[in-house]
Amino acid sequence: MNQRPARILIADDEPLYRRTTGQLLCEAGYECECVEDADKAINALQSKPFDLILSDLNMPGNLKLELLHEGRRNWSHVPLIVITGVPSIPSAIESVRLGITDYLLKPVKYEDLISSVRRALSSPLRSACQTDLDHVSASELSDRYPELIGQSEPMQELLKIVDRVAQSDTSVLITGESGTGKEVVARAIHTHSRRAANNFQVIDCTAIPESLFESVLFGHAKGSFTGAVKDQDGLLVQCDHGTAFFDELGELPAGSQAKLLRAIQEQTFTPVGKSTPVHVDTRFICATNRDLEAEVAAGRFRADLFYRLGVIHIPMPPLRGRGDDVVLLANHLLRQVQSAEKPKDRFSAEALDCLKRYSWPGNIRELRNAIERSVVLAESSVIEATDLPPSVQKPNSKDAAATHDLADASREEALDQAEQAYLKLLLKKHDGNVSQSAQQAGLSRQAMHSLLKKHRLDADDYR
Ligand SMILES: Nc1ncnc2c1ncn2[C@@H]1O[C@H](COP(=O)(O)OP(=O)(O)OP(=O)(O)O)[C@@H](O)[C@H]1O
């Protein structure tokens, strides 16, 4: 079969970078065209077909990521790799939302560039799905992901991102409070990806001592250290062609971070005590409940690893920000934890009210525990408010728990509580008048309404 070499468009305003990258890729057998700004890149795309775009972010004509927007809109079948010298979280997130294939930092090592280019060219984006994504209805997405219960706005946003991410091979970072469903989302990405038939390997970063990290991950040869009685494959080999899920990534010691970065970049590692490197084709998904950006700023987490993983960042919404999803989840969990001897049909209206009012600092895991407990305690087939844990039963438990736990709260939680308290004071002062409250807060009426909805406050209660 006589295939033409893949044609790559390189858009970058640094002449030296354009020349060297172009040369390297030509020597590797690709056909390259180099341009210095976004307009010329769009002209080039209009004039001939390309198989891949390598795009700088900071270049003329690309102030608002025009090349990415145009490229995804009109040439969604052409994978796009961002290569930037000035990384930023917003640009990385925006790039990912637009469906890029990879996000590399300058200076890029030759091996990293080549392996990223090969990956992009070998896993063509499912362009039809990508372009149609915004037209996929919320109910279609819910049907596609029955394991992810929730119809609130944050969940619909999340489903859209998960659906897009599942179609790519890019590394993903999932952040959020404990119990929000980070692992559930990671599994959903895996089971809806081309890797579904292979392993999803959970690697708990807190469970691997630093001294054993390489051996556990990469494997070891017999006799390479005391206790190594036979050759042993590492966890990464076990998820070759599958997905490696690194849970609690924020807890990974510095030395292990460096080793993980190399493995992610090169997809190649050498087992302890061996000399032949092993190549794997693994997708990396990581999760943490730490604020990794703050960890990077404090020097506790490697910036290069953070940027490498943050190509796609999925922030998990806390349960208290998901509106009535708590009811859907409660009913779903009730069906899951049913016992055949004492079946329960439903929650009483009062019990549902308590579930909606409580702030769920432990998120869905705490909800599950509360339901398991109430199923055991409830005497009739209906779960009453009194069957719920005492903290959930108290009418003002949301506020009480919130104030009580403020010292232990994350910044996000504390700000959320402060915002809610402020809204209540505003409504009280203006006798429930939303327009006046919005005016004082410097918000539009619409913005005020959506804030009230988010905090489940009803202006009528203050009239
Ligand atoms: N959207 C969802 N629909 C149904 N069940 C969910 C959903 N999200 C989470 N769960 C359930 O909630 C529990 C906690 O989820 P999971 O372990 O994924 O959370 P996590 O964020 O990874 O927690 P941690 O940070 O403590 O590891 C699990 O029992 C999971 O099945």
Image (spheres, grey):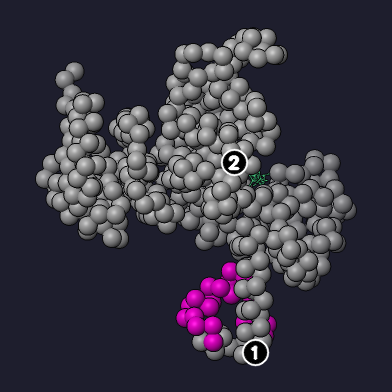
What residue is disc 2 on? 249
| 454 falls in the magenta region | yes
User: Hey, which residue is sitting farthest left in the picture?
Assistant: 47
- In the displayed structure image, the side of residue 317 where residue 392 appears, left or right: right
Which dot, 1 or 2, sits closer to the camera?
Answer: 2
Q: Point out the stretch of residues depicted in magenta.
A: 440-463
- In the displayed structure image, the side of residue 325 where residue 380 appears, left or right: right
Instruction: Please name the amino acid that badge 1 sits on.
Output: Lys
Q: Residue at x 16, y 39 (%)?
A: 33
| Residue 429 circle label | 1
Rendered position, 424 above or below 255: below
Instruction: Please name the amino acid that badge 2 sits on.
Output: Leu
Pick the quarter of the image with the N terminus: top left
Rendered position, 335 above or below 272: below
Residue 271 lies in what quarter of the image? top right
| 148, 391: nearer the viewer | 391
Inter-mark Cα distance, 1 to 2: 45 Å
- Residue 300 seen in this snapshot: yes
Q: Sequence order check: which comes first, mark 1 or mark 2?
A: 2
Disc 1 element: helix
The answer to whether the residue bearing label 1 lies less than 8 angstroms from the nearest atom of ligand 1 is: no
| 68, 357: nearer the viewer | 68
Q: Which residue is drawn at 61% across and 38% down?
A: 252
Q: Residue at x 67, y 87 (%)?
A: 428
| 60, 134: nearer the viewer | 60
The answer to whether the residue bearing label 2 lies less than 8 angstroms from the nearest atom of ligand 1 is: no
| Residue 252 circle label | none
Disc 2 element: helix
Q: Confirm or deny contact between disc 1 and disc 2 (CB under 8 A).
A: no
